[in-house]
Image: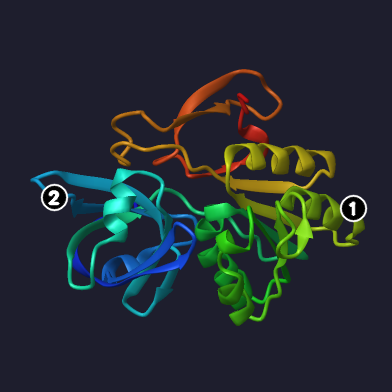
Amino acid sequence: MKQKKYDLKTTILSNQKVAEDHYMLHCNCPEIAHSAEPGQFIHVLFDAGGGLLLRRPFTIYTIEGQQISMLYQVIGEGTSILSKMKPGTAIHVLGPLGNTFTVCDDLDLAIVVGGGAGIASLMLLITELKTRQIETSVLVGAMNESRLLSQTDIQDLGITPQIATDDGSVGYQGLVTDLLSGLLSETSKHRITVFTCGPYGMLKAVANICHKFDRVCQVAMENRMGCALGVCLGCVCKVRIETDSEEFEYQRVCTEGPVFSAPNIIWDI
């Protein structure tokens, strides 16, 4: 059954800086809050001034009652404008959009790997895993301490994340993929799924590591989007028609994704 999408007019409840170049926005979206699932995202329309309306995709970070939150990075003019918007400002929110992560009930261990702002796409999943009492390890990578995201939110769920920073200012000095390799080489668990979101290069590395250790891996892609409705074809990625086949088709991250089985992705870089 096709999931219903809602286009809601709402107002910003809060919009606060939580780390270097990163902000957390809260708004009331009851219909989306009640129907969204881990991995899905929203498209937010806002007034950029001068009669210019911008729509940008954002992952759903948390759901609390009728409220949803989004954790976003300022990376261009649109998000820079959004970061300056005050509580009470009107926005339109379209969603929920995209597909979801698949979590099997018989998992021995779920490993969640977030790189940079990619952890924002994984917080709902971490919450669900905790609710379903599935043993979960969370690995978080960041450039440095000032850009580290979600540590407290993850700890509030009773999970102590393993952290890697490029400069060693927090946790392990190096790549979060090093932590993943170490964990997979040491664990005695059998039924394991790795869930990941982050920079393209990190996703490719996670996929390769999971292939090496013969572990299931689901990746949430973050390709640039235009319409987010599957019309413009601006967010496609190459997906194998059959596992282990070199034949592929282009699939839309906004529609067939954003979550894909890692072995099915053809990594171009």
The one of 240 and 175 positioned closer to us in this rendering: 175
Task: Please tell me in which quadrant of the rendered image residue 13 appears.
Answer: bottom left
- Name which residue type carries label 2: Gly
Q: Which of the two marks, 1 or 2, is nearer to us in this view?
A: 2
Query: Viewed as shown, does residue 231 lie left or right of 255?
Result: left
Indicate which disc residue 57 carries: none
Rendered location of residue 122, percent (x, y): 55, 60
Rendered location of residue 154, percent (x, y): 60, 73
Helix, strand or loop status at disc 1: helix
Question: Which sits earlier in the primary sequence, circle 1 or circle 2?
Answer: 2
Residue 182 vertical placement versus 264 (above, below): below
Q: Label 1 belongs to which residue?
A: 185
Q: How is the image coloured?
A: rainbow
In this view, the residue farthest toward the top is 247
Determine the CA span between mark 1 and mark 2.
Answer: 53 Å
Query: Viewed as shown, does residue 235 lie left or right of 211?
Result: left
The answer to whether residue 150 shows anywhere in this view is: yes
Q: Residue at x 58, y 43 (%)?
A: 199
Tag 1 and tag 2, C-beta contact below 8 Å: no
Q: Residue at x 19, y 67 (%)?
A: 10
The one of 255 and 243 positioned closer to us in this rendering: 255
Residue 220 vertical placement versus 102 (above, below): above
Q: Label 2 belongs to which residue?
A: 49
- Name which residue type carries label 1: Ser
Rendered location of residue 39, percent (x, y): 49, 55
Rendered location of residue 129, percent (x, y): 62, 70
Query: Viewed as shown, does residue 100 lie left or right of 90?
Result: right
The answer to whether residue 107 shows anywhere in this view is: no
